[in-house]
Amino acid sequence: MGAHHHSEPFPTGPLVGAGILVAFAILSAAVVRGTSVPATPDTAGATQVRNLHFEDRRDGAVVVLDADLSREIDVVAPGTNGFMRATLRGLARDRKRQGTGPEVPFRLSHWPDGRVTLDDPVTGRRVVLDAFGSVNAQAFARLLDGKEGVL
């Protein structure tokens, strides 16, 4: 059996068109990502909303502050509440990628349908806490009631 060769070259028109399409898609994605401002999650309609700051202490505890009242409302003891810590780390990582810090508080909301969400107005990210189970959502939801304590 002999090798079968075609002497006709591959048409360059479709190849150039495909290259232009790929370049346009990459350029469009870069422009949108570089110029878009994240939407601030809307909390209109929430039954409860609380603006919170979270600060790490040297001993490993996390201090929860009511941003509107400028006072400590809770302390997450060192080595406890892994879900809360992981959620906050993820949100802080997103802020760091954008070159922003902890100045703007996070927004914790309770909704008429029972959902509890944690929003980051800086990045536009919303975490629906109930999606991770009621126990995990309750770790945050208890911060809405205004009672002070230690987790």
Image: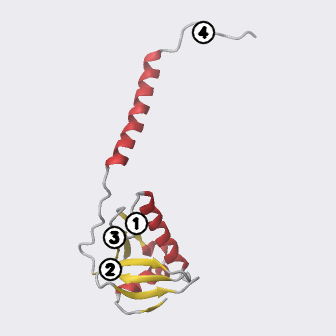
Q: Earlier in the sequence, mark 3 or mark 2?
A: 2
Q: Residue at x 34, y 64 (%)?
A: 122
Q: Tell me whether circle 4 and circle 2 mark residues in contact (CB < 8 Å).
A: no
C-alpha separation, residue under disc 4 versus residue under disc 1: 62 Å
Q: Earlier in the sequence, mark 1 or mark 2?
A: 2
Q: Which mark is residue 67?
A: 2
As helix, strand or loop, the secondary structure at mark 3 comes to loop
Q: Earlier in the sequence, mark 4 or mark 1?
A: 4
Q: Residue at x 52, y 83 (%)?
A: 61
Q: Tell me whether circle 1 and circle 2 mark residues in contact (CB < 8 Å).
A: no
As helix, strand or loop, the secondary structure at mark 4 comes to loop
How many residues crowd mark 2 within 10 Å: few (<14), some (14–19), many (20+)? some
Pointer 1 residue: 101
Pointer 3 residue: 104
Q: Position of residue 101 (x, y in %)?
A: 40, 66
What kind of residue is marked 4? His
What kind of residue is marked 3? Val
